[in-house]
Image (tube, grey):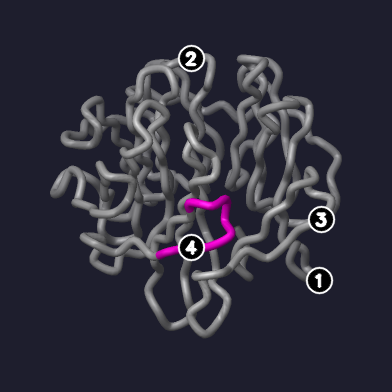
Amino acid sequence: GSLLGIFKSQDGGQTWQEKNNGLRIGVRPSVETLALDPQNTTILYAGAGYSGLSSTLFKSQDGGESWAPLTVGLSNAMISSIAVSPFDARAVYAGTRGQGVFASADGGRTWQRSGQYVLETNIAALGISVISGTVYAAGMRRGFYRSSDGGRTWEETGEGIGDRSPSTLALDPNSSNRLWLGGAGGLYRSDDRGSHWSESGQGIAGAKVVALAPKPSEANTVYAGVWTGGVYKTSDGGISWQAVPLGVGLVTGLAVDPLDPNLVYAGMVYLTGIK
């Protein structure tokens, strides 16, 4: 996903093809968030925004070759994050700016407001545990919430976060208890499903963390992308972090290859252009 829409690579990132069929509404969309169905990777969801228009949620069922809008019940919500249940592909969640979280039980065809009057309305990130199925939502200002019943009810947690303006959330695939949260106030770690948090950013303290990627094969290894530039890595569960050599640019996203965990991708914005 990019400021110019969606691009797809089938050779490990060596070459890319534009995949905006059905996404374009006069102009190319700005795609802030993408999510794959973990049970069927030909199914994708995308939150696309347009200049002067509110954003729209789209779905592809053919690996991104074509896209169709999902609008029933979404109320023209500005989509900020998407999460698909690893246990039931029909259960999809969308975080928004200004309207909280929406949930779908039918693969995105229809939507309902989730946890109305409970959640902070501006949602920065969503996450679902691949072990327990617990759904997590990080508010853009300070709130942190979790749901153990598919979003029907939510519990506000987050002691120790304060007003840290979260921007990214990552769940440890090896533990149902450990979570990572990054934002303008740095990096935080929880070992009790988000009930309590502690700073975990020695070496990157004070930096705005905008991307997180745990390494599935190593429980204590996590990569963190910093908005001021650079990628950091911890191998001891966040006790200390070291800078990873990378070109000059502002990191916007990180991903670990699921088939080769030693291969890491970084999306960056360069001062001379967008990559």
> Of helix, strand and loop, which mostly describes the magenta segment?
loop
Mark 3 or mark 1, which is nearer the start of the sequence? 3
Q: What is the spatial separation of the Cα atoms under label 2 and label 4, in whole angstroms?
A: 34 Å
Q: What is the spatial separation of the Cα atoms under label 1 and label 2, in whole angstroms?
A: 40 Å
Q: Nearer the viewer, residue 261 or 126?
A: 261
Disc number placed over residue 67 in the picture, else none: 4
Residue that protrudes farthest toward the left in the picture: 117
Disc number placed over residue 211 in the picture, else none: none
Q: Mark 1 points at which residue?
A: 272
175 lies left or right of 85: right
- Mark 1 residue crowding within 10 angstroms, few (<14) / some (14–19) / many (20+): few
Secondary structure beneath label 4 = loop
Q: What is the spatial separation of the Cα atoms under label 3 and label 4, in whole angstroms?
A: 21 Å
Q: What is the spatial separation of the Cα atoms under label 3 and label 2, in whole angstroms?
A: 35 Å
Q: Which amino acid does label 3 sit on?
A: Thr
Secondary structure beneath label 3 = loop
Q: Quadrant of the N terminus?
A: bottom right
Q: Nearer the viewer, mark 1 or mark 3?
A: 3
Instruction: Specify the segment rendered in magenta.
Output: 61-68
Whole-percent x, y for residue 135 in the image: 33, 32
Mark 2 or mark 1, which is nearer the start of the sequence? 2
Q: Mark 3 points at which residue?
A: 15
Q: What residue type is labelled 1?
A: Thr
Q: Name the residue under label 2.
A: 175
Q: Which amino acid does label 2 sit on?
A: Ser
Residue at 32% across, 23% down: 195
Whole-percent x, y for residue 243 in the image: 79, 35
Mark 4 or mark 2, which is nearer the start of the sequence? 4
Mark 4 or mark 1, which is nearer the start of the sequence? 4
Q: What residue type is labelled 4?
A: Trp
Q: What is the spatial separation of the Cα atoms under label 1 and label 3, in whole angstroms?
A: 20 Å
Residue at 53% across, 21% down: 173
